[in-house]
Amino acid sequence: MKTSLGLVLALCLAGLQFLAIIVVVSSSYLSSERVLLDHARSLLRDVGINTIVHSQGFLDPAQGAAELAARLAENRIVASENRQLLEKLLFQQLQIAPQLAGLYFGDREGNFVYVMRSEEIAPFRSKIVTRNADGHRTEFVWRADDFTIVDSRTDPNDTFDPRERPWYQEAKQQNGMIWTDPYIFFSSQMPGITIAAPVVGTSGQVQGVIGVDIEISAISDFLSTLKIGENGTALIVNKNGDVIAHPKPELLKAANPDGTFRLPGIDEVDDAIAREAFGNPSKMEFVPVDTETYAEFTYEGADFVSTIMPIMSAELPWTIAVYAPKMDFIGTIIENRTRDIWIAVLVAILTGVVGLMLANYITKPVRAFAVRAALISQGEIAPSAPSPKTYKELERANETLVSEILQRKKSEREYGQTFNLSSRGMVQISPDTGQFTRANAKFSDIVGYSINEILQMTEADLSHPGDPMVFPNFTSDNLENGGSSIEKRCIRKDGETIWIKVNAIMIRDNDGKPLHAVATIDDVTQSKITEAQINKLNRDLSHLARGELLGRMAAGLAHELNQPLTAITQNADAAILTATSGSEHKGELVRILNDLDQQAHRAADIVKALRGFARKGEEWKAPFDLTELIGQTLLLVLPEATEHDVRISVAADDLPQVYGIRVQVAQVIVNLLRNAIEAIISSGVNKKTINVSASVEGDFVKVCIEDSGPGVDPQLGLFAQFETTKNTGMGLGLSICRSIIEAGGGRIWYEASDDLGARFQFTIPTTA
């Protein structure tokens, strides 16, 4: 796609105008946003501090009440034996501090006095447990505001003992005031805490424990009155992660399996934004902080700001957590920014229209210059035709361009004549698709298609199915340094398979981008036939030479083994005759058996010498390049493989040098490859592939040769001598291969292929 110069100028003017406005708007927006966010952070911190002050102010009277009651008891102003006087003291303290839910005292004998607020029968209710030698008695007394009795009852089934309660045991153990974690009171079903302090007698022993129950729901009421932006929220979280105060008090209950209630953890409170802001992302647990912590986060596409305050004190390990939507603070400037951006767009559009009109006027002579150059290039007007009026700077460029056009047209004409009249087939091909874009008559004669038919085809339409594609790889490294040459098979229009030799070069533009490939094509079918005949004759001669050698070895082996085997047979007959004739010939029998043993050893020595033939030449072992050797051996079997459409692939790169007798290792590879080819040919399978791979395994290189043939009968002893599946084979090939590999310090083995073929593998050491 070509871009108009006028359009470029107009867009540049509009873009610069738009960019300038955006820079100004963005700078103003960022500075304003930072100021407002700093203000938001300060506001959140102030909310946290106010909440801390309010909570401490709410709880200080309760702590004072507990300390006062403990001191009164310690000074024996209230004797534990006088239950009514102790009850009245607790009653008066409860009236003074409205935030207290109840006060109680339990002594070391198990006596208990508890005064609490009540919503039934009367405003206050007392529970008095008395223990003596006759047992215990539990009495409930309801009192009016003036301490008069409204009603009373006893409960013989109540077995409450304060000494078994955690607040009693912990206060006694620590011998000091304790604060419990917030929990849900059983009677009022409201959140609260308990403060307990020991009452110490003159002897220094703990006489009992006095405690105060404090409802903290008023703190949630305070949080609901806070103004934090438009939609901000503050909550209080205990150190164990329980949410103990929230603007919505109804969220502060979580059911237990036994039907009772507890405070919800930060991971289960019905406030998803609070969970996102203050929960641990991996465990959804609350993590208290040591210093004020400010953060920004996103939840369901909305941005938020949050602050977590440090814990209030050791007695009140509570943390104030505050969050609010960021839009509550910067929403107005975002709206202004959006408006300013639309203004910038409108200004840019107007600037672009004006710029387009100006650019159209400026580029009019340039367009006339471009039209004249195009007409000259197409041959519609002569180069000598008068030039249109243009800018002074373009006149010299016009002369140079016309000269270049004429030179190019001359080169194109000469190239076209060379291309069309060439005695060799020539084509132009698209480097990406392999589509033929131009062809000469010689190539048409080679493939049997007309030129028009060829221009509608790709390389895939002419290539033999068993040969690799060439032209889609033209952009690869094969053509980076100038050209590529390959021989491959081609299918003519009449169905005949021919061999062609392709020499290709890539034509690129000034930036190195491929334009098209130019290939010269030669029909090398006859030379391939001649080469195949020579290779076949060479293989036949090699087979004949190997057969003659095996014949000589067989004759020599038969001659060498004949004498000891004959002696063994004769001595065995003599031994049998001597053994059956009586015991008086034992000496003769021993002599015959000794002779029999000697002849057997002689036969074994002959076989041992034959086996040692494969190991002979140890002094010729040397390091060599296995990858190179595999490539050379493939050249020996490739003609036979190609003749029978057997494809051989190799994966043997980056290998270290191996140590052995190079020619013997080559004999092993050739033998295994020929066995694979012969197995595939004889089986008639459709898939005809052989995969050769090599990899490093410790101090060895493992070579694997796998074929797609029928595999090997499991009952066949592959590496045993004279075991074969071939009608004309002697069964010595794999046995010799094993001797060569094992003599070199490696091993050879067989395993069935995953595709029902055969897989032979052997190892070669990388060191001496």
Image (tube, rainbow, N blue to C red):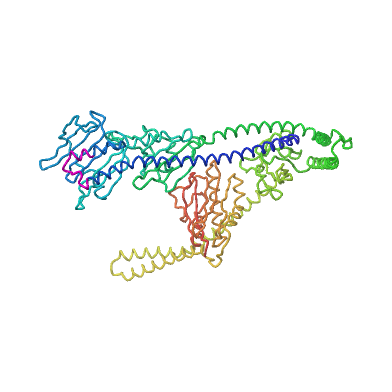
Q: Residue furthest left?
A: 134
Q: Residue at position x 62%, y 49% from top?
A: 639
Q: Position of residue 110 (x, y in %)?
A: 17, 43
Instruction: Determine the image quadrant of residue 473.
Output: top right
| Residue 154 position (above or below residue 767) | above
> Count of labels shown?
0
Q: Position of residue 251 (x, y in %)?
A: 37, 33
Is residue 441 in sight in this rendering? yes
Residue sitting nearer the eye, 316 or 372 = 316
Is residue 496 in sight in this rendering? no
Judge from the rendering whether residue 341 lies leftward or rightward of residue 247; answer left or right: right
Instruction: Give the magenta-colored segment's residue range.
Output: 73-89
Judge from the rendering whether residue 659 lies leftward or rightward of residue 594; answer left or right: right
Q: Position of residue 541 (x, y in %)?
A: 61, 54
Residue 552 within the segment the image draws in magenta: no
Instruction: Determine the image quadrant of residue 623.
Output: bottom right
Residue 88 within the segment the image draws in magenta: yes
Residue sitting nearer the eye, 212 or 688 = 212
Residue sitting nearer the eye, 481 or 485 = 481
Judge from the rendering whether residue 698 lies leftward or rightward of residue 62; answer left or right: right
Q: Position of residue 631 (x, y in %)?
A: 60, 54
Q: Residue furthest bottom?
A: 587
| Residue 165 position (above or below residue 593) | above
Residue sitting nearer the eye, 157 or 292 = 292
Q: Residue at position x 71%, y 33% from top?
A: 351
Q: Quadrant of the N terminus?
A: top right
